[in-house]
């Protein structure tokens, strides 16, 4: 579900495993500015979580970054969306620094998932529904077709494009 968001299958597995166990998460970025790969390692701000909580935290982190215009997040941006921290939005003279509270930090501070979504200016049901709808659309694609995804669109080799706003 979160492979595109995480940047790779390995990163998605590290995220889910780390959140489930409450253990260290390592995300690798193979497309950094210098052309070499680097990694970011962090520990979640929460205790171990069940599958539903992992799904909610990653869905809300993805939505948080999308609300800042970030559809292809770096490992550092994912860490900030989860644990809190600063990210840079935009480039050049228009770039600005944004402080994120962090989905997991808000959860650790005692907020419920609905409250966290509301603090982000959205609703949990909308975020979860949009993400599940996009995933269902991908699952319905014929076997053997090539699918390229981003957080907003799915395009198949036959040229069909499905959009899911808000994911």
Image (spheres, rainbow, N blue to C red):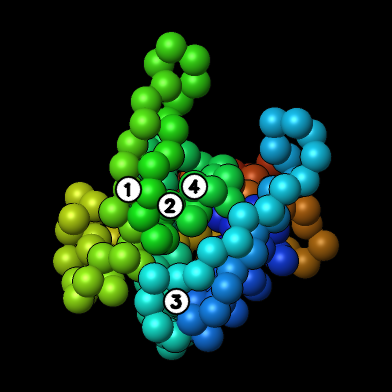
Residue found at x 39% / y 42%: 86
Secondary structure of the residue carrying numbered label 4? helix
Other residues around mark 1 within 10 Å, as few (<14) / some (14–19) / many (≥20): some
- Which quadrant is the N terminus positioned in? bottom right
Tell me residue 167's x, y (percent): 42, 52
Label 1 vs label 3, nearer the camera: 1
- Which residue bears the numbered disc 3? 54
Secondary structure of the residue carrying numbered label 2? helix
Q: Is residue 6 rendered to the left or right of residue 10?
A: left
Q: Is residue 86 rendered to the left or right of residue 136?
A: left
Q: Quadrant of residue 122?
A: bottom left
As drawn, the residue found furthest toward the top would be 93
For marks 4 and 3, the one nearer the N-term is: 3
Other residues around mark 4 within 10 Å, as few (<14) / some (14–19) / many (≥20): many
Cα distance in 3D space between marks 2 and 4: 5 Å
Cα distance in 3D space between marks 2 and 1: 6 Å
- Which residue bears the numbered disc 4? 77
Residue found at x 80% / y 40%: 36
Q: Nearer the viewer, residue 5 or 99?
A: 99
Secondary structure of the residue carrying numbered label 3? helix
Please determine whether, in this image, residue 84 is positioned above or below residue 111: above
Other residues around mark 2 within 10 Å, as few (<14) / some (14–19) / many (≥20): many
For marks 4 and 1, the one nearer the N-term is: 4
Residues marked 2 and 1 touching at CB (< 8 Å) = yes
Q: Quadrant of residue 119?
A: bottom left
Residue found at x 65% / y 72%: 13
Residues marked 2 and 4 touching at CB (< 8 Å) = yes
- Which residue bears the numbered disc 1? 100
Residue found at x 49% / y 21%: 91
């Amino acid at each position: 579900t979160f492979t595109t968001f995480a940047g790779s299958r390995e990163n998605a597995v590290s995220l889910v495993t780390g959140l489930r166990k409450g253990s260290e998460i390592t995300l690798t970025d193979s497309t950094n500015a210098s052309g070499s790969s680097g990694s970011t390692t962090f520990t979640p701000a929460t205790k171990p979580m069940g599958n539903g909580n992992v799904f909610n935290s990653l869905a809300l982190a993805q939505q948080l970054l999308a609300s800042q215009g970030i559809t292809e997040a770096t490992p550092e941006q994912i860490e900030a969306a989860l644990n809190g921290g600063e990210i840079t939005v935009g480039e050049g003279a228009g770039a600005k620094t944004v402080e994120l509270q962090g989905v997991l930090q808000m959860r650790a501070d005692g907020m419920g998932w609905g409250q966290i979504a509301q603090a982000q200016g959205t609703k949990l049901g909308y975020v979860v529904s949009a993400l599940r709808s996009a995933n269902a659309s991908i699952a319905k694609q014929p076997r053997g077709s090539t699918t390229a995804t981003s957080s907003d669109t799915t395009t198949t080799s036959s040229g069909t494009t499905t959009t899911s706003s808000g994911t």
